Image (cartoon, helix red, strand yellow):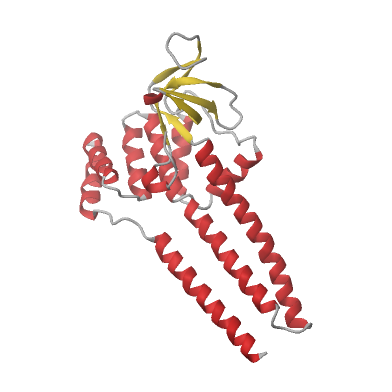
Amino acid sequence: MTRNIIATSMVGALMFAVLTVGILFISMDNSTDVEAVSVANQLYESGSYQEAKIIYEGLIAQGTADSSIYFNLGNTYFMQGDLGRAILNYQRAARLDPRDADIKTNLAVARSSTAELSTSEPVEPIKKVSTFSSAWLTLNETALLALSLWFGLVFLVLTFRQFQPGKIRALVQYGLVLTSFMALVTVATLGSRLYTERAQPEGVIVAPVVTVSSSPGEEYATEYRLFSGAEVNLLETRGDWAHLAGTGGDAFDGWIPLDTVETITKASHFAVPQF
């Protein structure tokens, strides 16, 4: 019995070590040019929004994945009246820091200023789960939580097998059931987010106004118009055209020029494919 407990403890220690390495790896972020950020912030405060925007975009082009950079870039676009790119960058900031109150506030303000609102809750169950999770956890944090629960589940199974029937074994069994439930929920949540971000990535209209056609091509009938800041789901691309659908309860479907919309996720920062 003693040897089994020692072996289980060693396995638990190994799992903890692997999990710690995973945490350090996932939490690693690209270094930020503090001096450049300071200069850009000063330009923004002085009202030089165009100059500040150029620096923020330069930092992002260099590979900086920092929510504050996207947030500040969103602010410069908002002050310049470009609601589409303001919402786009607030959304990108939220992907990296979903619990930040300032990001949520500014995103809500920008949305309220658009000609079209697409902020209602998604109808599809998978989309609901994905949206609820993304409001609190990043994709990496969700993956890390799933990994942690899996390690915990394995450790509890090994521990359960070492004890004879009794109070300790009963407590371990309760923990095993609870951890199993949490692991299933977390894995399902992770799966829903991966699916929605790959199958129907969210995008934002960045053109001042765009006409939505029934098929990909200027010769087809115009269905309606969308304005800068409208939030959509991208279904597919065909040449220079993107097939989109409304987010949440907004029921629309059509085609728009590909250069009039940008996806929220970026492959280098969020590890999802791009259109």
Q: Residue at x 35, y 39 (%)?
A: 75
Q: Position of residue 235 (x, y in %)?
A: 52, 30
User: Going by the image, does 134 lie left or right of 170?
Assistant: left
Image quarter in which the N terminus is found: bottom right
Left or right? Give the position of 46 relative to 247.
Answer: left
Q: Quadrant of residue 46?
A: top left
Residue 51 horizontal/vertical position (percent): 21, 37
Q: Nearer the viewer, residue 106 or 245?
A: 245
In-front residue for pair 150/248: 150
Foreground pick, 170 / 8: 8
Q: Residue at x 35, y 57 (%)?
A: 29
Q: Is residue 102 visible?
A: no
Q: Is residue 260 visible?
A: yes
At x 40%, y 25%, the residue is: 258
Q: Quadrant of residue 4?
A: bottom right
Of residues 107 and 7, the one nearer the viewer is: 7
Determine whether, in the image, residue 5 is placed left or right of residue 45: right
User: How many numbered tags mark residues here?
Assistant: 0
Report x, y in % for residue 212: 48, 17
Q: Position of residue 19 (x, y in %)?
A: 49, 68
Residue name at image x 51 percent, y 60 percent: 144
In the rendered view, tell whether residue 67 sits above or below residue 246: below
